[in-house]
Amino acid sequence: MDFVNAIILLLNYIFIPALTYGSQLALGAIFVTLIYGILRFANFATGDMMSFGTMMTILFTWYFQSLGVSLGVLPTALLAIPFGIIFMILYMLLIDKFVFKYYRHQKSPPVQFAMVSIGVMFVTQAVVRIIIGPGDRRFFDGEKFIIKAREFKEMTGLNEGLAIKSTQVLTIFVTIVLVSLLFWFLNKTKTGKSMKAYSDNEDLALLSGIDPKKIVLVTWVIAGILATIGGALYGLDKSFKPFTYFNNMLPIFAAAIVGGIGNPFGAFLGGYVIAFSEILLTYAYKKFFMYVLPESMEPDSLVQLLSTDYKFAVSFSILVIVLIYRPSGIFKGKVL
Amino acid sequence: MVGIFQSWNIALSIFNLCLISAVMTMGANIQWGYAGLINFGIMGYTALGGLAAVLISVDPVQEAWRAGGFDIIMSLWLIVVMVLVIRFILKRFEKSKIRTYSIAAIIISGILLIRFSAEPGIEAIEAVDPAKTGFLGGFGLPIIFSWIVGALFAGGLAFIVGKVALGLRADYLAIATLLISEIVIAIIKHEDWLTRGVKNVIGLKRPAPYEVDLQTTDWFIKLVEKFNSGKLSLIENLADRQAALNQLVIEGSSVFVKLCYSGLFLVVVIILLILTQKALYSPWGRMMRAIRDNEEAANAMGKNVVKQHLLIFILGSAIVGIAGAMLVTQDGLFTPGSYRPMRYTFLIWVMVIVGGSGNNFGAILGGFVVWFLWIEAAPISLFLINFFTAGIPETNALKAHLIESVPYFRFLMMGLGLLFIMRYRPKGILPEKIEIK
C-alpha cells in the first residue's frame, strides 16, 4: 500500500504538473522554432506576443460573460480563443508588414532581426499594459477540479490524494490535438511540405516555384494559433500577468534550443524535458522516501536536490550544457 | 530643463543615472560596436558590480563569521580542489567518453558534498540576527574600492561565460548570455548568507557627505547664505530670514550631495572615454574592427580571434561591473529583486543602438537621451494625452484609462524609438566614424 501511495504522490506533485507545464512550454517552443526555421530569427517578442493573444482571449471572455454565454463546466475562454487567435494573427501580420518585411527584403543578418524583435517586444509590452494593465488576472470559470484530493482518498482509501484540475486535462488534451494536427499539416499537406523545403534551403525552394509570401503568411498564421492557445492555456491554469509571460520566454527558448532549433518535434519534446527536469530537481522527496523506505532509514532532511528558488536556473543550466556539448540540440536541429 | 520645470534635485538625480547609464552603454558598446559580440547579460554584470559594493563596504559581521565562517571557507576550499582536479584530468587524459563522464561525476558529487558541508554553516549564518544581518558582511573598506572590485567580479564572470559561450553564433550568444545572467540573479537572490538575498542590504557607506551632517556644518551654511544673499536680504524679519535660510540649507544639502556624486561619476566617465577613444584608434582597435568585419580574413592574417573576443568580452563586462557598483553606491542600497532584464539589459541595448554602435560619444549620448526619455516618458505622454483629449470630459472612461496607464507609455516610446532608428538610421544618431588613411 505504501508503494501505491508513493506512486500517487509522485503523480500528484511531479508527473501531472510537469506534463501540464511542459505542454504549455512545448506550444511556445514550437512557435519559436517555426519562426526561427522559416523566418530565420530568434524572436525575443515571443513571450509578449503570447501575452497579447491571451489578453485578446480574456477580453472576449469578459464580453461573452457579460452576454451571459457560457460553456457550462468548461471555461468560457475556450469559446473566446478563436477570436483571440484572429486578432493575434492580425496583429502579427501587421507587425510583419511594417517591421519585419523590410529587413527580410534587405536580407539582414539574424542579429539585426533579433534587435528589431526587441523593439517589437517593447511595443507589444506597452500595448498589453496600456489595454489591460500590468496586474494579475484570473479568467477561469466553470468546474475547477475533475477529481478532488479528498474524493480520491475516500474512493480508494489511500493516504495520498490525487487532485486533477480540469485545466490540466484541458491543457494536455488541447496540446496533443493541436500538435498532431500541426505535424499532419507539416508532413502531409503540400503547403506544409513547401514550408519545410523553404526552411531547409531557401534558394532551392524559390527555384522550385514556392511562393515565399504564402509561406510567410502561413507561418504567421500557425504562429498566431500556437501563441494564443499556448498563452491562454497557461493563463487558465495559473493566471495572466504580462510580466510572467515575458519571463516565460526564457524557458521557452531553452526548450526550443534543447530540442534542436528549427525542428518542431524537438521543440515539442524539449518543452517536456525542461518542465520535468525543473520539477524533478527541485522537488522535496522526503515524503516519497518515507513511503518507500523502511522506518529505520527515513531521511531527516527534505531530500531536495536544489531549492525551488532555482527552478529557472535549472532549465538554463540544462540549456548551457546542451549548447556546449551538442549545439544542434538533442534532436539535431540546425547547426548553430 | 527639468531643473527649471521640476526641481534641481530631480534634475541632478536624472543626470547621475544618465552618467551611470552612459558607463553601462560604453561597456556594451565596446563589445558590440568594436567587436560585434552580442551580450544580453548586462543585468548579471550590473548585479555583480552591486554585490561587490556590498562585499567591500559593509562591516564584517563577526558573529556570523564565528558561527559559520569555517564551513564556508571549507566549502570554498572544496570548490578550488574540485576545479584543480578537473583541470588535472583535462590535462592528463585524452578526450574520451570516460573522461567526460568522470568529470560529470566529479562535478555532481562535488556539488552534493558542498551542499552537505555548507548547509549547517549557512543555516548558522542566516540565524544570526536575521532582521538586521544574517549574512557574512563585507570587508568594511571605503565603497569607492568596490568600483574596481566590481570590475574584477564582472570580468571574472565574463571570463567563464566567454570560455563557454563565445563560440556560439550571434543570436545564440544573445540567448545564452541572457539566460546566464538570469542564473546569476537567481544565485544572488537566494544565497542569503552572502548577499542577504531579497531582504536587501540598506544603509551602505557613502563616498559623499551625509545631508544631515552638512546641515550642521558652518561652512556649508555660509555657502548657501552667500549663494542666496540677494533673495535673503529681501526678507526684513530676522526670524523669517532664518527660517528661509534653514529651508534653503536643507534643499541645498541634498543638491550638494548629488553634485558630489555627479563629480565622481563624471571623473569615471571621462577616464573611460579617454581610454576607450585611445583604444578605438590604436592598432588594437583596428584589429578588433578587422575581426568584426571579417573574422576569417583576420584569422588568416594571424590574429587570434578567439583570444581577442574573450579579451574584449571581459573588458566590456568589467566596465558594466563598474557601472553596477556605481549604481549601488549612489542608491546606498542593494536590492537583488530589482534587477530585471527589461531595465538592465534591453534598455541598455536600446541606448547602444540609438546612440550609435562603435562610437563612444554615441554611446554616451544614447545613455543620456534614452534614460532621460525613460524617466520623463510618463510626464510627456500625460501632457500629450491631455493635449489630444482636451475636448473630452474628465469622466470619459477612455481618457481615464489612458491617464491611468501613463507609466507604460515609456515602453511604447522605447520600442517605437528603437524601431524607427533601426529602420531609418541603422547606425544610430552618431554613426561610427573611422578615418581610413
Image (spheres, coloured by chain):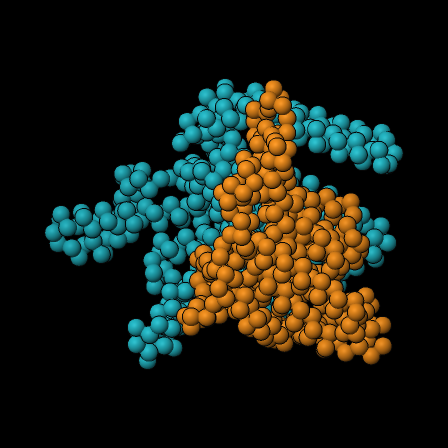
Chain colours: A orange, B cyan
Q: Residue furthest left?
A: B237
- Image-quadrant location for residue A230: bottom right
At a point 29% along the width and 50% down the height, the residue shown is B251
At a point 61% along the width and 19% down the height, the residue shown is A296
At a point 78% along the width and 45% down the height, the residue shown is A325
Q: Is residue B111 above or below residue A203?
A: above
Q: Is residue B331 visible?
A: yes
Q: Is residue B31 visible?
A: no
Residue B428 percent coordinates (x, y):
60, 66
Q: Which image quadrant: the C terminus of chain A?
A: bottom right
Q: Which of B353/A6 is in front?
A: A6
Left/right of residue A191 with respect to residue B333 in the rendered view: right
Q: Which of B104/B199 is in front?
A: B104
Residue A265 percent coordinates (x, y):
74, 58
Residue B2 percent coordinates (x, y):
38, 61
- Image-quadrant location for residue A183: bottom right
Left/right of residue B287 with respect to residue B336 in the rendered view: right
Q: Which image quadrant: the N terminus of chain A?
A: top right
At a point 66% along the width and 56% down the height, the residue shown is A26
Q: How many marks?
A: 0
Q: Is residue B225 above or below residue B33?
A: above
Left/right of residue A316 with respect to residue B248 in the rendered view: right
Q: Which of B240/A47 is in front?
A: A47
Residue A75 percent coordinates (x, y):
50, 62
- Image-quadrant location for residue A225: bottom right
Q: Is residue B401 above or below residue A250?
A: below
